[in-house]
Every structure is written in C-alpha cells, then in structure tokens.
C-alpha cells in the first residue's frame, strides 16, 4: 500500500502565521528554558503519520535550525522501512537532521513492547545527539480517548490524568514534551494537507481489534462529546494526581519508619493517600510496581485487622499501625553423616 508521498516543494506554514504563533506559545509554556537557549535542540519523534508529520512541520517553521527528528522502525509491518525512508526524504527537504532507529519487539503484548522499545531507542538517540528535549505528537483527541478507555477500566486518578504536557521519558532524565496536546486531530491533518505532503496511513489505526480504535470510532459518532473538554478534564485530574502525590510524600516522611525486618507504617491520611504509600512500600522493598487492585486488597485486609501478602512481602496489622516485611528464608536441612 502507499506509504506517503512528497510534493516537489513542501509548503511550511509561514513563520508569522496563526498556526506557528500558537505552536510557539504552546511550546514556550512547557519549555521556556529551552526556547531561551539558542543552542537547545528539540528532538521530534516522527512516524510519518499525519499527527507527527504536522508536529515536524510546525517545529521546523517555529525553530529553524534547532530541530532534529527520529523515526523508530519496529519492523512489525512490511511497509515500515519504506515509511522511515519517506520521513527521511521529508526531513531532507526541510533541512532537518534525521535518524532511523531500528528496534526489535519481542512476542507478547506487542503494543506495550513496541512502546518500551520505541522510547528506549529515542532516549539513546537523544542522549547521543545533544537533544535537550524530545517532543511527541499526542493531541486532544488522544487524551480524550485515553480518559474514556481508562474510565471504562475503572482506573484511579493517576490513570485518568492521561499524559502530561511535560514529563520525563520512561526510565530516563530526558525531558518529554507534548506541545500539541491542546490541538485536534483534524487541525493537524489539515496542516499536513496544506503543506502538500500525503502522510503515511497506518492500517492499525482502523483495526477494530484494538480498544483505542473502537473508542475513537465511538467518540466520533457521539457528537455531544467534546474531546477538548475531555482533555481539559484529564488535565484537572493531573492536578489532583499531583496533589495526592504531594500528600503521599508527606505521609511517608511523617509516618513510615524502618524496623529490623522491614518498614512500619502508622496511617494517618485518607484512603487514596494510604494506597499510594503502600504502593511505594512495595516498590522500595520488593522492586516491583504493584497493581492498583492488589494494593486495594492489602489495604482492605489490614484495615479490617487481618494480615495480607503482596509480592514477596507480608503485611500485618500491629498496635497503632502496620508492618511490612519479607518472610524469613527457610533453612535448608542437611543430612548428618555418621
């Protein structure tokens, strides 16, 4: 199938246009320290689809000479190598440095594996090319879809908050920016059309086997739902999540203490904060990220006065609080030679 097409000349949005001014303002709101430095380069993750292509065009117009791009080739579709060449050719026409990053995705949860491999490759690329921040093309429709999907899965506040406009790439200190989070999918597609570029069409974006595709279609058919308003709600939930995290850090500092075999916790906060403290205890003692349902069961058991286990830890109610410890290792018996 066609992987995209380039015109003889790519029409960037004019530097003084409303689109470029809006993008520059959105970027400045989340990366003021970067825009103040003339040597700070912005890395763009570009798949060749309309969203990331629009981000590339906007960044090239707003930050001439300060943009680099990378395309991760997961090798999951026959067209992926040609799509990477398409992006490379587009970047060449724009005067933007470009790299193709091949990755290997292990069998299993392909989407999750692909995401992990993608960010790992992008972080390595950015660190090796003096990239100050990495930008991705998540937009308002993505945010709305994520919120509804997670509502349907009974997610807590952290999950419902969706993606933030500014954060860190997974397992790294690399600044991760989402400067078009307030833009609609259609706005980005129209910008690409106006440039003369025909972006890549990923068939997985119309595959009903994926939950997100089904949610996207349902959202499009519900005219009374406003994706921008839903995205704003996710932002409000992000504020609430930050407040809960602040409270959990204070609860930890004031009420968690080491003991000979683990940690003792005297809970004093509301349930939502206590759950976060329990999660942190598990992360620090057992080196794993517990599921929310597991943590809730531990809380309910301890709150009712019964012991519980999670991972390799045993939690017990004690006078005035709870203790978390690992069970003692069993001694291996040895036969006595006579």
Image (cartoon, rainbow, N blue to C red):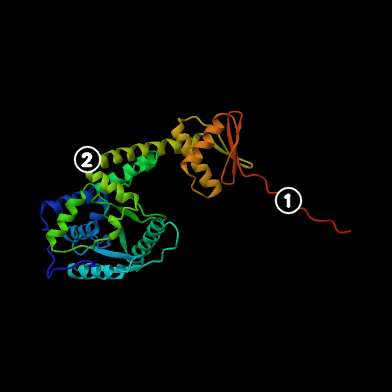
- Between residues 307 and 16, which one lies in front from this camera angle? 307
Label 1 close to label 2 by CB (< 8 Å): no
Q: Secondary structure at mark 2?
A: loop
| Extreme-front residue of the structure | 208
Task: Place residue 123 in its image quadrant.
Answer: bottom left
Q: Secondary structure at mark 1?
A: loop
Q: Which mark is residue 226?
A: 2
Write the residue at 34% across / 67% down.
101
Where residue 264 appears, as percent x and y from the top left, is: 58, 37
Label whose residue precedes the other's in the sequence (1 or 2): 2
Quadrant that contains the C terminus:
bottom right
- Comparing labels 1 and 2, the label whose residue is closer to the camera: 2
Write the residue at 23% across / 56% down.
51
Real-space Cα distance between discs 1 and 2? 62 Å
Q: Which residue is mark 1?
A: 331
Q: Residues within 10 Å of mark 2 (few under 14, many from 20)?
A: some
């Amino acid at each position: 199938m066609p992987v995209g097409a380039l015109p003889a000349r790519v029409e960037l949005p004019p530097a003084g246009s409303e689109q470029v001014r809006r993008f520059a303002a959105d970027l400045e709101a989340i990366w003021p320290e970067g825009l103040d430095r003339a040597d700070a380069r912005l890395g763009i993750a570009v798949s060749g689809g309309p969203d990331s292509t629009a981000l590339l065009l906007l960044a090239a117009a707003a930050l001439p000479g300060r943009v680099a791009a990378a395309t991760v080739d997961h090798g999951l579709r026959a067209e992926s190598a040609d799509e990477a060449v398409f992006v490379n050719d587009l970047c060449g026409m724009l005067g933007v440095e470009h790299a193709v990053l091949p990755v290997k995705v292990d069998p299993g949860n392909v989407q999750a594996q692909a995401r992990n491999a993608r960010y790992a490759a992008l972080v390595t690329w950015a660190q090796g090319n003096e990239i100050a921040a990495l930008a991705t093309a998540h937009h308002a429709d993505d945010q709305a879809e994520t919120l509804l999907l997670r509502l349907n899965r009974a997610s807590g506040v952290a999950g419902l908050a969706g993606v933030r406009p500014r954060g860190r790439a997974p397992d790294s200190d690399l600044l991760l920016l989402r400067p078009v989070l307030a833009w609609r999918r259609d706005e980005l597609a129209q910008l690409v059309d106006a440039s003369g570029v025909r972006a890549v069409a990923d068939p997985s974006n119309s595959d009903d086997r994926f939950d997100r595709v089904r949610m996207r279609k349902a959202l499009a058919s519900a005219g009374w739902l406003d994706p921008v308003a839903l995205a704003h709600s996710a932002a409000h939930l992000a504020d609430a999540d930050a407040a809960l995290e602040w409270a959990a850090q204070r609860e930890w500092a004031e009420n968690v203490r080491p003991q000979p075999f683990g940690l003792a916790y005297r809970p004093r906060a509301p349930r939502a904060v206590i759950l976060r403290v329990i999660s942190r205890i598990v992360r620090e003692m057992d080196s794993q990220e517990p599921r929310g349902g597991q943590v809730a069961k531990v809380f309910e058991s301890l709150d009712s006065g019964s012991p519980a286990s999670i991972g390799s830890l045993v939690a017990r109610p004690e006078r005035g609080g709870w203790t978390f410890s690992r069970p003692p290792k069993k001694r291996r018996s040895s036969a006595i030679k006579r």
